[in-house]
Each structure stands twice: as structure tokens, then as C-alpha cells.
Image: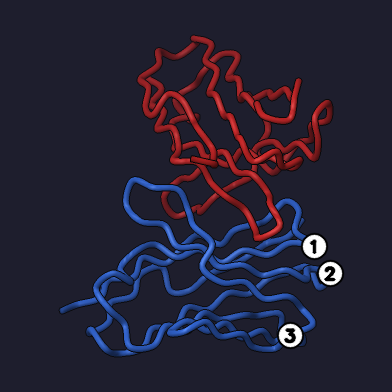
Chain colours: A red, B blue
Amino acid sequence: IAGITQAPTSQILAAGRRMTLRCTQDMRHNAMYWYRQDLGLGLRLIHYSNTAGTTGKGEVPDGYSVSRANTDDFPLTLASAVPSQTSVYFCAVQGPYGYTFGSGTRLTVV
Amino acid sequence: GENVEQHPSTLSVQEGDSAVIKCTYSDSASNYFPWYKQELGKGPQLIIDIRSNVGEKKDQRIAVTLNKTAKHFSLHITETQPEDSAVYFCAASIGDYKLSFGAGTTVTVRA
């Protein structure tokens, strides 16, 4: 089934630990995005990639990094997690009919 | 950058009534305005969108209107049903890139 796969579904992480959230698409679209969703704040853009080999900063990039080695994968890394990074993270792919979102990763930093 | 404001934050309607959600945007260069529906435990899903060369668009019970002069756009749901209960997000962007989202509206349809 074509779509986006995010992993893990949920995670509890100790503060200071490193964590990589995975996002894989099989739709072969160029543009991919990472958003975080927090109550009352909607979805805020963390990082984006217009095509393989390029990335850019969104609205809230601090504490996060991304890479885009190929078209299909767009991992998001928290180098040293802090409690304020507790959130639900969504990966999205931009296609000809709008964005398609993954099912999200619920991350709790304690 | 673009700032999108969305109102109300919560909306409760009787089944069969209409629901209206309003959004304003700050960047006059924005020309793409999608609406997303998010059900519990799932990612947002596109339900309708409008571009700045169109003032209104309908898809069955859902319609979106755009006022470029006032920089606001609205989602209208008619004849609401229980399955319309969800969180709705508006968004805006220049082209289709880097959407900026509103804070969301939780819609509850009462049976």
C-alpha cells in the first residue's frame, strides 16, 4: 500500500539521549516535511527537504537535524533530547494532490 | 513568515446543523489554502483546498471561501454528521511549499 511509514509509533526517552525518528515513503515524491504537533499550537514546521540531497530549516528547527540521502527516507534526529521536545511528530510528503501525512510518532522526553 | 490564525478553537453543533471555521493569514503573497481533518490517533488528511484565483469551492457537504482582500478563508460543513467530529486545521502557503497551519478547531457533532 503506497504511503508513508513512521517509526516508532511512540517512545519514552530520557532527557539527554539521542533519538532518530524514521520516515519512509514509497510515492517517489520530492518534497518531504517534518512537523511537530502541540495542543493549542497546531502543526509547526521543523525541517523540510525539497529533493534528495537538500534540506532546509522550518519554523522550529533548534535541537533537531535531518538528512535526505535518497528520495524515500527523511529521518529526524534529536541530538540531546529535552522535555520541551515532548510532542507528536508528523512526517509529510508533498504530492500533486496536497500533503500526505504519516500516522505520527508520539515522543515523551522525561 | 506566514502567520495563520484559526477560530474557534472548539465548536459543538447539533447533528444536521452547519459548522463554520474561520482563518486569517498574514502574508498577502500566500496563494494556496488547504483544509485538513485529523481523527483521533491519525495524521491530518486533506479534505479540500482552494487557490487564490478562486473565490469558492465546493465538494458535497464541504465548501471553502476565500477573501483575498481581507486575507481570510473559511470552511463550511453543511448537514453535519457524527463522522464529521474531528480536529480541523487550516493552512496557507506560497505555492504548495512549507504550509503554515492554524492551531486547529475541535468539532463535536452532537447526536
Q: Nearer the viewer, residue A70 or B14?
A: A70
Looking at the image, is mark 3 or mark 2 nearer the viewer? 3
Dot label at residue B29:
2
- Quick check: do tags 1 and 2 share a chain? yes
Is residue A7 rendered to the left or right of residue B13? right
**Which of the pair B87/A102 is nearer the observer?**
A102
Q: Amino acid at mark 2?
A: Ala
Outermost residue toward the top?
A17
- Subunit of mark 2? B
At x 39%, y 88%, the residue is: B78
Q: Earlier in the sequence, mark 3 or mark 1?
A: 3
Above or below residue B62? Residue A71 is: above
Kind of element beneath mark 1: strand
> Marks 2 and 1: in contact by CB < 8 Å?
yes
Bin the neighbour count of mark 3 within 10 Å (Cα to Cα): few under 14, some 14-19, many 20 and up: few
Q: Is the same chain shared between marks 3 and 1?
A: yes
Looking at the image, tell me whether mark 1 or mark 2 is earlier in sequence order: 2
In the displayed orientation, state which residue is furthest to the left: B111
Q: Which mark is residue B54?
A: 3
Q: Position of residue B98 (x, y in %)?
A: 72, 51
Q: Residues under labels 1 and 2: Cα distance?
A: 6 Å
Identify which residue is drawn at 34% across, 70% down: B107
Question: Residue A1, percent across and down?
Answer: 48, 40
